[in-house]
Amino acid sequence: MDVYYAYTYATAGWLTLQAAPLVITPTIIITLLSPDVREPTVLEEYFSRSLGMTLFTLGIMIILLTGSVPLTSSFSDTTSAGVTTAESDPKAPYAVPTLTISLLYHSAAAFFTYARYNTSGQTSFALGAIVYAALASVGLWCVLFASSGGRISRKTGADKRTSGFPFSNKESASAKKKQMGKAI
């Protein structure tokens, strides 16, 4: 699960990195983006700050909804050492949907920034495409491999999702059961 938490914090960090200049200095950002040297309008500043606050809020929501920060209402769920027990540590119910939505966001943003790089040739779009593609790749890995616990058999210790088809699999739970049945 370390990759999962690294993904959520990297997503929040990347969104905060993009949000900070939009909120703090929208005039400079708008002036840099404008082909003409002019004072930005009030509406442009409003949209810039609104986008920055939205990106910042999205980063915080991703951290909170994926369970990276434990949200408990009381201290009764902790042991005497201050560490939560495995039985009382609930997984965030919105972790997988939030992970999937952030994965789709990073994929769409990677596609968009790559398309902008192809049309404009600016290096900043290439950098954005690389970061978004890397986050989308890690998010896809988390959806495929880190979102479900393995189904390990208590008797054999083998993963129950493996099978012996089309080749014989000696680590399969059914093969282990057959071997245990022969030993008895």
Image (cartoon, helix red, strand yellow):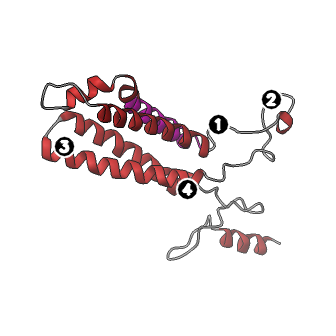
For disc 2, the neighbor class at 10 Å (few under 14, some 14 to 19, many from 20) is few
Q: Earlier in the sequence, mark 2 or mark 3?
A: 2
Residue 32 falls in which quadrant of the image? top left
Question: Bounds of the magenta span?
Answer: 1-19
Q: Earlier in the sequence, mark 3 or mark 4?
A: 4
Locate residue 6 relative to residue 27 in the image: left or right: right
Q: CA distance from mark 3 to mark 1?
A: 36 Å
- State the predominant SS element of the stretch in magenta: helix
Vertical relation: 45 (above or below) 111? above
Q: Which residue is mark 3?
A: 117
Query: What amino acid does circle 2 point to?
Result: Gly
- Where residue 108 is drawn, which disc sits there? none
Q: Earlier in the sequence, mark 3 or mark 1?
A: 1
Task: Specify whether residue 149 is painted magenta.
Answer: no
Task: Specify whether residue 8 is painted magenta.
Answer: yes
Q: Please state which of the two labelled residues, at mark 2 or mark 3, is closer to the viewer.
A: 3
- Where residue 82 is drawn, which disc sits there? 2
